[in-house]
Image (cartoon, rainbow, N blue to C red):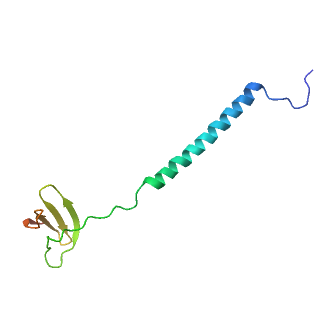
Amino acid sequence: MPSDGPQAPLPEVRFLKILVTTLTATMIVGLVAIIALLVIRLPGAAPLPELPAAITLPEGARVQSLTFARDHLVVVTDQDMVLIYTPQGELRQSLTLN
């Protein structure tokens, strides 16, 4: 006849509970470590490049985009102009966008 009182869990079930609890704690610690590393290692906003002092823009033009290449600099202005300069600041070509 079965007894109605509480029974002790089987040793395999107790071992399994310990394994699951350990795995859960390990995963929580790992997740916290990954989040902490991301917060510490990821830089803030990258500084924007500055227009070299040797380059002069047309009157009233403001830089919208600046691209540095090996042998030229490309400047796109708010007046829909594409200006191509040499690294020394000499205007090589000027294009107007339609």
Quadrant location, the C terminus = bottom left
- Point out residue 21 in the picture as x, y percentages from the top left corner: 67, 38
Q: Position of residue 40 (x, y in %)?
A: 47, 55
Q: Is residue 77 shown left or right of residue 19? A: left
Question: Dividing the picture into quarters, in which one does residue 57 lie?
Answer: bottom left
Residue in front for this viewpoint, 9 or 79: 9
Q: How many marks?
A: 0
Residue 60 visible in the displayed image: yes
Task: Indicate the quadrant where residue 23 lies.
Answer: top right
Instruction: Residue lying at the far bottom in this picture: please name it.
Output: 59
Q: Is residue 11 above or below residue 28?
A: above
Q: Position of residue 15 (x, y in %)?
A: 71, 29
Residue beneath the point at 32% across and 64% down: 47
Residue at 34 percent across and 61 percent down: it is 46
Q: Position of residue 37 (x, y in %)?
A: 48, 50
Q: Residue at x 66, y 35 (%)?
A: 20
Near-viewer residue (11 or 82): 11
Q: Is residue 46 left or right of residue 63?
A: right
In depth, the one of 76 and 33 nearer the eye is 33
| Placement of 44 over or under 15, stated as above or below | below
